[in-house]
Amino acid sequence: MVTAPHKVTSFIILATPHCNLAATSAFLDPFRVANYLVGANQFHWQIVSLEGGAIQTSNGMALVTEPLAAVAEIPPDFVVVSSSWTPEHHHSPDISKALLRWAKRGAKIGALDTGGFILAKAGLLNGKRATVHYEHIDAFHELYPDVEVTESLFEIDDDVFTCCGGLAAADLAINILRDTFGTGPANAVARYIFHHNVRGAEATQNPDQLEPIGHTMPGLVRRAIDVMEAHLEEPLSIPEIAAQLSVSQRHLARLFQNYVHKTPVLYYRDIRLDRARGLVTQTEMKLSEVAVASGFSSQVHFSRAYHARFGLSPKKDRIEGRVPFAFRAWPMHSPGGG
């Protein structure tokens, strides 16, 4: 039996339309389990949205919420913004005012997935470390250069915390349990939900060596990818990369075909286009600037490559790309586009 904390700890989960249900549930469930193991309601939460009512999450399921106005004056211990697609469309002055009011009253303010964009818009991340889902890191950096954005699973900086989302939200919750109530309750909860390897804030979103299903990518391929990712704006040639790694181009190409199933040239082009797509759909940067930031000197070449990979032009994707994939009528990748 877990020893009960002295007081009820309250959470407000502020969810936006198309938020990630898995991340939201992964964050809350450790506290639900703690209540069960304690045998008392030591953790209490309310799920709210700007207008209240049922909101559709990113997997199409509905989440029932209370209106923000109904809880705006409640003094919670924690406020967590859960957002995923198009966070800029779901921010509002009312949300910023509520977040700032809660922070002033001493609540710990957090965010899951792209909720960090909403905290940054409210000014709560100025001069702090923060993280968002890796797909949105480039856009976040462009929009909020005063925030130190990292690729960590989560960041805790004073009374503000951010998490990349997904199942990492469970790691964050268990770490909060440990820091607030001790190792014993945290271990009991982790065992109960079969989360046997709790990761800390120092863990990265994309570990260098181990693949999720246990396959280890050769170090030479990983190092080549690291070089590519470090030179997205000013791409190196494949011969230059091979020379840096002291390997022949032929051997490097063979390794990429065996483990990545693409040539080095195609893989390099695709990660540059992936970066471009994030900037196209998540920022208001000029498309000419996006092309340069992604290593394309020719706007025409950029547009053609973009269309080949994603099935539509950057200009059109700027509009349609803000709609979650599940609700679009076109495929993310065209046949043969990698």
Image (spheres, helix red, strand yellow):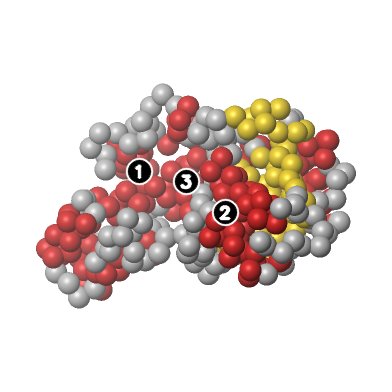
The x, y position of residue 22, in whole percent, is: 53, 43
The x, y position of residue 307, in whole percent, is: 34, 35
Q: Secondary structure at mark 2?
A: helix
In this orientation, which residue lies closer to the viewer: 255 or 154? 154
Residue type at tag 3: Gly
Q: Dot 3, how many residues are within 10 Å of its Cα: few (below 14), some (14-19), or many (20+)?
A: some
Kindly tell me whether residue 255 is visible in this rendering.
Answer: yes
Q: Locate the N terminus and report the quarter of the image it occupies.
A: bottom right
Q: Which residue is mark 1?
A: 302
Given this view, does label 3 or label 1 mark the residue nearer the observer?
3
Q: Which residue is mark 2?
A: 169
In this orientation, which residue lies closer to the viewer: 127 or 3? 3
Kindly tell me whether residue 128 is visible in this rendering.
Answer: no
Residue at horizontal 21%, vertical 68%? Answer: 242
Q: Is residue 256 above or below residue 158?
A: above
Q: Which residue is mark 3?
A: 278
Residue type at tag 2: Ala
Q: State left or right for residue 100 relative to residue 222.
A: right
Q: Secondary structure at mark 1?
A: helix
Residue at horizontal 50%, vertical 34%? Answer: 59
Q: Which mark is residue 55?
A: none
Residue type at tag 1: Phe
